[in-house]
Amino acid sequence: MSFTLPPPITPLTGLDAELKAQGSAVIDRAGLVALAGIDSAELDALPPFWGRLPPDTHLRDGGRYRRRRHSCFVVDGRSVAAVPHRAHWQPVEYNALHGGFERWFEPVEPEMTALPAWAPLLAALGAQASALRGPQAWFVEAHPFRIDTTDGIGRPTPEGAHRDGVDLVVVMLVARQGVKGGETRVFDANGPQGMRFTMTEPWTTILLDDRRVIHETTPIQPLEPGRGHRDTLVLTFRAGGFQGPV
């Protein structure tokens, strides 16, 4: 059995201070539920949608290990509004592998975004972005990912350690089945400090100040040949507008 370091869970009462002091903070399922003001059982309606994610057709490393969808929202206070479907775009400065061109993905299923947990989650995390940067509207991109072991190895971050060009990055572990690896690594963007741990419990959530830290997740391998996956929901919060080609 491989050894894994557990994530350093921050009590919800210390979340703002930890995020400001360290540039990152991790909360568990109970903390996420309390932050969003939802029932814990409402989270359990979300994972089945990961079983219907279409393949990512834009992988430039030739892999077949990633499935995903993508949709965009504007969060302003408690208001969460979907915007017309748009491409995902990042500059090459932040994503050397997949930056510089528009990537169109199938949208997140409307049945998923209509679930009772969805809007409160986005609104609560938008409030965390406002606590970090000041109250304002937030331009949010939602990425449900499944990384599987079809190729024998799956790469959650094929671009390596990176920033996303936003203000706040949120990574939620939705499910982890039959895999080893997948270690989360967070580094100070301007210094030697860093930490590493493995998220194993569903709804463990890391919040990242994207201006201050870079992050990556190590590859996963199957515990049994040809089986196993890691599901996450990644939400990015950006002030001023969505990223797009100039």
Image (spheres, rainbow, N blue to C red):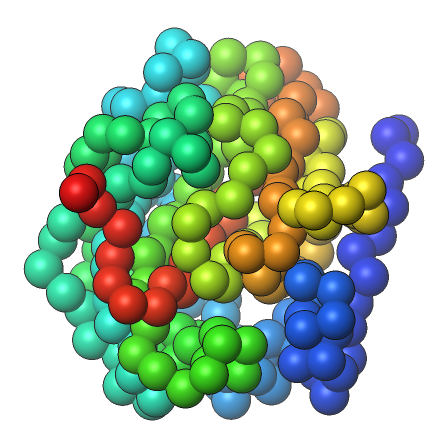
Q: Is residue 49 above or below residue 60?
A: below
Residue 95 location in percent, x, y? 43, 32
Please give left or right for residue 6 compared with residue 129 in the image.
right
Tally of numbered tags: 0
Residue in the image at 35% along x and 21% along y: 59
Percent x, y of residue 75 = 30, 77
Seen from the viewer's position, the closer of residues 100 and 109 is: 100
Quarter occupied by the N terminus: top right
**For residue 222, what is the image quadrant?**
top right
Q: Is residue 178 visible?
A: no
Q: Mark yes or no: residue 90 visible.
A: yes
Find residue 106 and report its horizontal and vertical position in percent: 19, 42
Q: Considering the image in quadrants, where does the C terminus appear?
A: top left
168 to the left or right of 239: right
Residue shown at 27% from the left, 51% from the top: 243
From the top left corner, tell me how far across and down residue 50 is, in percent.
Answer: 39, 47
Based on the displayed image, in which of its 4 quarters is residue 84 positioned? bottom left
Above or below — where is 181 with respect to 225? below
Above or below: residue 241 compared with residue 32: above
Extreme-left residue of the structure:
84
Looking at the image, which residue is at 51% across and 89% down? 37
Q: Nearer the viewer, residue 225 or 60?
A: 60
In this rendering, would 232 be left or right of 224? left
Write the residue at 27% across / 23% down. Answer: 57
227 in relation to 165, above or below: above
